[in-house]
Amino acid sequence: MSMESVLAKMEFRKFEASIIDFFMKKNGYAIVLTEDTNFTTLLRQTLNKHLGLRNKCFTQVSTVEETIKNIKKELAADRKLLVFIERIFKDREMSSLVRKIKKEYSQCKIFITMTEAPKEQFILLHELGADNFITKPIAINTFIEKVAHSIKPQSKISQLIDIAKTMLEQGAYEDAANVGRTVLKAKPGLSAALLVMGDAYKGMKKYEQAHKCYMGAGDSAPLFLDPLKKLADLYGVAGVKKRQLDCLTKLDKMSPLNVERKLDIGHIYVDLGNFVSADAYFEGAVRQANKEAMDYLGSVSQRIASAYEKHDPERAELFLRRALRVKGDNLEKADVETFNSLGIVLRKQGKWRDAITEYKRALQISRKDENLYYNIAVASAEGKDYKQAAACLKKVIQLNQEFVRTEPATAYNMGLIFYKAGELEMAKVHLDICLEIDPTHAGARKVLSLM
């Protein structure tokens, strides 16, 4: 056997040892979202037969909800997690799941399993935080090497970058900048260190220095995505909308499947009064969200509606109705917020009857939602149907006696509705609570003076 072969074998033994150490000594575990029995067989053979691990090392799940549930459970048990996700699962792209896991459970290592992927999809998943990609079919040795590379201990440089990021989160910007300088002395031009320095300067409101750092990071970043994102954020903080828009549109060309960015671009166009361009990006966001997940589509539609709510309620209504129409009969509790948003934009157009119709549709999903009854009461009052409004408020009180204390405006609205419905005793109780929360509330004092 040649020396080269011996060294390669020794290197591979290190890969195997690091995986065994991860599962046996570091409380490691894997969660697998796939319908591919060949892949789960490969995983079982690798862990149990090839590496000789006898304990249960992984769980196969069959839904997105089950994936999240198991992640919460294993993290609560102080596990270190590897999450294997099929790129397209049950005819749906799993980008939104990757986004959710990296946002809420960032300590998880995510592996995307796939037979192939368009370049744009690969870039998106990389941007969302996927740690590694497994193209099937894959040999056991290649699989072991990929997993080992993703779980290997951090270098000293990486540890320092993480320390600096923690300092940034705590607002210790000067300290983070000092750590960044230390790293750059050891490794000049390192993109990650320049990004940390840029964030530190941005935190200190030294925007010119932040700009230089981000531009410098772009020179050494392979895709230039992160530096461009940082520049876009910097221009946003500085209120330079057009330069922020330039960065975001460049990013959209590089990674055209990112729904969140299309929403950001659309929002800026709305602020600039360019509704035609805003519509184009919002439409793109809706199309992509629909490919990913229906519940994500609802969230996207609400954000579009919030952008248009003040400027063009009819456009907001259009997007919200489309989201509900796409879901058809598959409505669930998560969609109540979409109905609430739709009710708000309908009321802004004076369509209080239509708003009540939508709130009542939402009640079919969530019959004990006091917020919906309150919204029906407010919409009824807008239509001067004070008896129906008061009846709905009594249902609110029945479901949640503390609802009135949500905020002064809520207590005032309830008191005013009861007053106009002729229920003076109930009106006084709620207006008194309003003044208890906010003794300076002029509206409540005025209505009480009329009683």
Image (cartoon, rainbow, N blue to C red):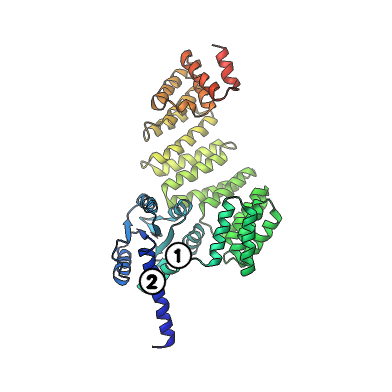
Quadrant location, the N terminus: bottom left
- Using a 10 Å C-alpha cutoff, classify the residue at mark 1 as few (fewer than 14 neighbours), some (14 to 19) or many (20 or more): some
Amino acid on which the number 1 mark rests in the picture = Asn
Which mark is on residue 17? 2
Residue 295: % across, % down: 42, 46
- Using a 10 Å C-alpha cutoff, classify the residue at mark 2 as few (fewer than 14 neighbours), some (14 to 19) or many (20 or more): few
Residue 176: % across, % down: 61, 57
Residue 270: % across, % down: 61, 43
Q: Secondary structure at mark 2?
A: helix
| Quarter of the view holding residue 177 | bottom right
| Label 1–label 2 contact, CB within 8 A | no
Q: What residue occupies the far top of the structure in this picture?
A: 451
Give the camera-side residue of 233 and 58.
58
Give the camera-side residue of 113 and 199.
199
Amino acid on which the number 2 mark rests in the picture = Ala
Mark 1 lies on residue: 132
Query: Taking 279 as reference, is 102 left or right?
Result: left
Q: Is residue 15 above or below residue 270?
A: below
Q: Secondary structure at mark 1?
A: strand
Mark toward the start of the polypeptide (1 vs 2): 2
Q: CA distance from mark 1 to mark 2?
A: 19 Å
The structure residue drawn at horizontal position 58% and vertical position 20%, both measured from the top left corner, is: 443
Q: Is residue 173 above or below residue 444?
A: below
The structure residue drawn at horizontal position 66% and vertical position 61%, both measured from the top left corner, is: 215
